[in-house]
Image: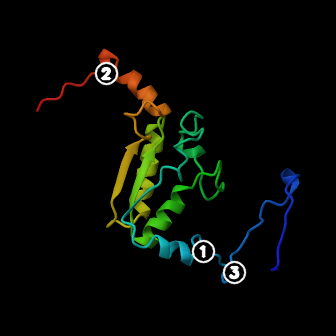
Amino acid sequence: PGLGLVLNFDNYRSMNKSLKAIRPGYDWQNYPTYTKWFLDLMSNVGTIRFLDWLGLNGSPYPASGIVEWETRPNQIKNVRYNYVPHEIIIELSNLLQTNVWLNVPMNATVNYVTQMATMYRDNLDPNLIIYLETCNEVWNSGYMAGFIYSDWAQQPENAVILNP
């Protein structure tokens, strides 16, 4: 058989947190965010929906109170809760020249939305399109956001009159 490596993380809280697993064929001192294989696989995609990358579907994110820009996962603080920082999403979109479909957290503050929009304006290739969606499927009461927005939409004071 081939070579193998087994790591035991039973007492991981006291371990060094800078462990990196590097695929063969890559420079360990200058490892890319994305492998050539992944970039090749995604090369013909026109738009990527980053719903799960942002942790908005099937995770504690919408209900956890993490809606302030300052508490979001980012490259400086490292990825938290397996969410992917916006900086990494921008990097991939620029590399692939693919449009971005973002989902904004249900309880995002105005500052969160403003800072997110500013980051994309300043760093995403201006030829790319950004699609924005509030949460995920706010019409679908099977999701927390849908349940909450459905209740909100049924309140008479929130009615909107549309004129054709």
Q: Which residue is mark 3?
A: 24
Secondary structure at badge 3 equals: loop
The answer for how far apart the CA atoms under marks 1 and 2 are is 48 Å
Number of residues whose C-alpha sits closer than 10 Å to that of mark 2, classed few (under 14), some (14–19) or many (20 or more): few
Residue 140 in percent (x, y) is at: 40, 34
Q: Is residue 33 above or below residue 58?
A: below
Q: Nearer the viewer, mark 2 or mark 3?
A: 3
Pointer 2 or 3: first along the chain:
3
Q: Which residue is mark 1?
A: 32
Pointer 1 or 2: first along the chain:
1
Q: Nearer the viewer, residue 23 or 132?
A: 23
Q: Residue at x 17, y 29 (%)?
A: 162
The answer for how far apart the CA atoms under marks 1 and 3 are is 12 Å
The answer for how far apart the CA atoms under marks 2 and 3 are is 57 Å
Pointer 1 or 3: first along the chain:
3
The quarter in which the N terminus is drawn is bottom right
Q: Residue at x 45, y 27 (%)?
A: 147
Q: Residue at x 38, y 44 (%)?
A: 133
